[in-house]
Amino acid sequence: MSRRTRFLRWHRQLIARKWTHSRRRPGRPHTLPEIRRLVARIATENPSWGYTRIQGALKNLGHRVARSTIATILKQGIPPSGERPTSWQSFLRAHWGALVAADFFTTEIWRVRGLVTLKGVLIQCCICRPGRHVDQRGVES
């Protein structure tokens, strides 16, 4: 290849680079739709959480989002933490792993005279919801 053709090719590329404008707008890029959906989901599932707590949850998931960005996202349709409604369904969904069903009951014992209900004896039994593990908490008399 001759020097002249190499020089002309280089010149064409330089001119093309100079007059090719990028389509990006100046400023910060928009927040990803995935992050917007995640912020909205966290806010609706946890009505008592504010901007800072949502920011901490996102940080635990590996996303760096500013508190002001979360505030901007939530101001576009989700009310502040004190005004968000808490339904039983959202409460149960948020705390399902920690719920325990507990019950008190009495017991009967076989004696010489037959079946006798012990008076004043109370047994507390707990069932942990996720694993359905039964645990006897205590006996009181």
Image: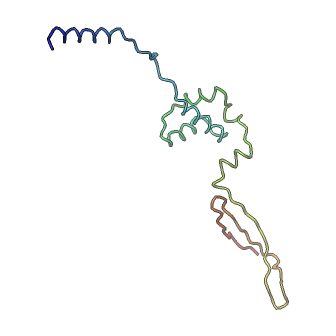
From the viewer's perspective, is residue 104 above or below residue 129?
below
Q: Residue furthest bottom?
A: 112
Q: How many marks?
A: 0
From the viewer's perspective, is residue 138 above or below residue 38?
below
Where does the N terminus fall, quadrant-wise?
top left
Q: Residue at x 44, y 17 (%)?
A: 24
From the viewer's perspective, is residue 57 above or below residue 124?
above
Residue 139 image position (x, y, % from top left):
72, 73
Display coloring = rainbow
Residue 38 image position (x, y, % from top left):
57, 36
In the rendered structure, the answer to whether residue 138 lies left or right of residue 6 reads right
Q: Tell which of 6 and 25 is nearer to you.
A: 6
Q: Tell which of 30 and 50 is nearer to you.
A: 30
Where does the C terminus fall, quadrant-wise?
bottom right
Q: Residue furthest right?
A: 113
In the rendered structure, the answer to whether residue 31 lies left or right of residue 1 reads right
Q: Residue furthest front?
A: 1
Q: Tell which of 128 and 21 is nearer to you.
A: 21
Q: Residue at x 66, y 68 (%)?
A: 135
Residue 108 image position (x, y, % from top left):
80, 80
Q: Residue at x 77, y 68 (%)?
A: 104
Q: Residue furthest left?
A: 2
Quarter residue 111 falls in: bottom right
Residue 6 image position (x, y, % from top left):
19, 12
Q: Residue at x 48, y 35 (%)?
A: 64
